Amino acid sequence: MEEAVAEPGEVTAAPAEQEAPKGRRRIGVLLVVALLAFLIDLGSKLLVVARLENHAAIKVVGDVVTFQVIRNSGAAFGMGQALTVVFTMIAAAVIVVIWRIARRLYSLPWAIALGLLLGGALGNLTDRLFRSPGVFRGHVVDFISVQHFAVFNLADSAIVCGGILVVLLSFRGSNPDGTVHQPAAKDETGRGGPEAKGE
């Protein structure tokens, strides 16, 4: 049988993208990381509410880092105070998206990144659902105060770390399914095909 020959200037798919993902699915890793992040966040909130709420702030690193309980009706780091229900729905949507991606998850770094995002989202969503003043309107417990910055919690930290890792993996060309995205092949002029030129 004759082999197909690519036309001049035609961009062919990179070998790594043509191959099926190899190895085991990493849903277990994602769930373990998410569970740990969620439990650590939940435990820290229960502890600080019981011990620190309505008490003076505790200095951790002088006046730079202190522990003080603040009920936050907005998003991470206190943004959007009047949009509590909206942020609750966004957190729920993020969880659904992560779960859909998990069905084709073969990359260990992606599993860790998505696990951090999932655990952080679940941590803050739990506050939205079960804390006062009511379901979908609950205020998130924040307690880590950094001078000249914001007051946040460990769920926020997990979300930020997971987000940074996702960005780094994307820049490296890594995909959740374990494949690696290769740059578009250059044509004979050395300038690349239509995709490389943005056409």
Image: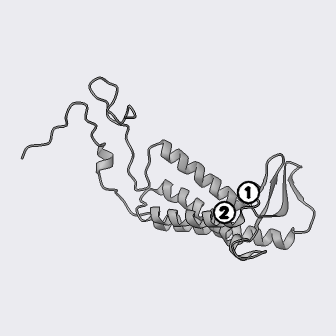
Residue at image coords 79%, 71%: 47
Tell whether 150 sits left or right of 124.
right
Residue type at mark 2 is: Phe
Residue type at mark 1 is: Gly
Kindly indicate whether the residue at mark 1 contacts the one at mark 2 (C-beta within 8 angstroms): yes
Tell whether 150 sits left or right of 26.
right
Residue at image coords 28%, 37%: 11
Q: Secondary structure at mark 2?
A: helix
Name the spot of residue 28 as percent of width and height, x first: 48, 68
Residue extending furthest toward the top: 189
Tell whether 140 sits left or right of 13.
right
Residue 161 in view: yes
Residue 2 placement: quadrant: top left
**Residue designated by label 2:** 87
Given residues 88 and 62, the one toward you in this image is 88
Residue 33 in view: no
Residue at image coords 71%, 60%: 154
Residue 189 placement: quadrant: top left
Residue at image coords 76%, 64%: 73
Name the spot of residue 131 as percent of width and height, x first: 75, 74
Q: Secondary structure at mark 1?
A: loop
Q: Tag on residue 80?
A: 1
Q: Tag on residue 146?
A: none
Q: Residues within 10 Å of mark 1 (few under 14, many from 20)?
A: some
Name the spot of residue 170 as percent of width and height, x first: 49, 46
> Looking at the picture, does residue 45 appear above or below residue 194?
below
Quarter holding the C terminus is top left
Q: Residues within 10 Å of mark 2 (few under 14, many from 20)?
A: many
User: Which is nearer the N-term, disc 2 or disc 1?
Assistant: 1
The CA span between labels 2 and 1 is 9 Å
